[in-house]
Image: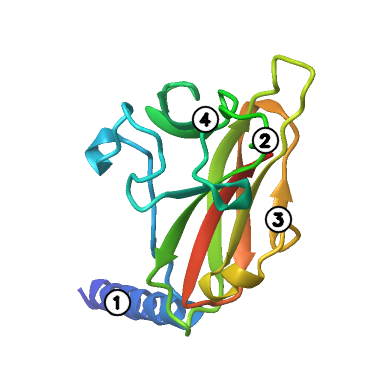
């Protein structure tokens, strides 16, 4: 009986210690997540722009007419997915489409912000090549943002890949997916 009591007390202390270590290291929490599913109020009948806080912009500040929206099971067994591209803009003078979603709720005291995305890029069926990138940047930097800030480029791939970015603390972040 004494041995069991010591084991229980030892286990409690170990649990408390791990809990304190987790607090000291910073707890993981999800500030924003989407699977682009109908349960999250996404509707496949509409473009992604305007749904769940997603915004869009084409070159010269115009509302983009190039492809963006939702599709089902393009990445097998993962339900609905958001997309950009898929069909060309209505005007030949429109050469750039950006989609973004402001993200709020990140505390200044947070040491590391992790941003992960599962994405797949499918090559064009014509001789024209597209350029895709994910960008994450502080909201305050929006007016100063350039294409070279926190940019990741990925070559065409038919295999979905997970990409993770680590950023210093900011009060707000925007995510942006662009094609040109």
**Real-space Cα distance between discs 2 and 3?**
25 Å
**Which residue appears at 46% of the width and 79% of the height?**
21
**Image position of 44 (left or right of 151):** left
Mark 1 lies on residue: 12
For residue 85, which quarter of the picture?
A: top right
Q: Are the residues flagged by discs 1 and 3 in contact, CB closer than 8 Å?
A: no
Task: Please tell me which residue lies in front, 73 or 25.
Answer: 73
**Image position of 3 (left or right of 48):** left
Judged by depth in the image, the label closer to the viewer, 4 or 1, is: 4
**Real-space Cα distance between discs 4 and 3?**
22 Å
Secondary structure, mark 3, is strand
Mark closer to the chain start, 1 or 3 = 1
Whether residue 56 is situated above or below residue 14 in the rendered picture: above
Mark closer to the chain start, 4 or 1 = 1
Q: Position of residue 98 (x, y in %)?
A: 57, 46
Mark 4 lies on residue: 67
Q: Are the residues flagged by discs 2 and 1 in contact, CB closer than 8 Å?
A: no
Task: Please tell me which residue lies in front, 92 or 137.
Answer: 92
């Amino acid at each position: 009986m004494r041995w069991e009591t010591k084991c229980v007390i030892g286990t409690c202390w170990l649990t408390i210690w791990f809990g304190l270590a987790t607090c000291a290291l910073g707890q993981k929490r999800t500030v924003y997540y989407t699977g682009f599913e109908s349960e999250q109020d996404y509707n496949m009948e509409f473009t992604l722009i305007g749904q769940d806080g997603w915004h869009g912009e084409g070159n010269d500040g115009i509302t983009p007419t190039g492809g963006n929206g939702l599709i089902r099971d393009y990445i097998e067994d993962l339900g609905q997915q958001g997309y950009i591209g898929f069909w060309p803009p209505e005007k030949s003078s429109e050469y750039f489409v950006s989609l973004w979603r402001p993200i709020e709720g990140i505390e200044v005291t947070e040491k590391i912000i992790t941003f992960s995305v599962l994405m797949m890029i499918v090559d064009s069926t014509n001789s024209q090549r597209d350029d895709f990138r994910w960008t994450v940047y502080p909201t305050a930097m929006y007016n100063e943002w350039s294409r070279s800030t926190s940019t990741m480029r990925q070559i065409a791939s038919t295999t979905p890949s997970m990409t993770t970015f680590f950023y210093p603390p900011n009060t707000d972040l925007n995510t942006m997916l662009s094609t040109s």
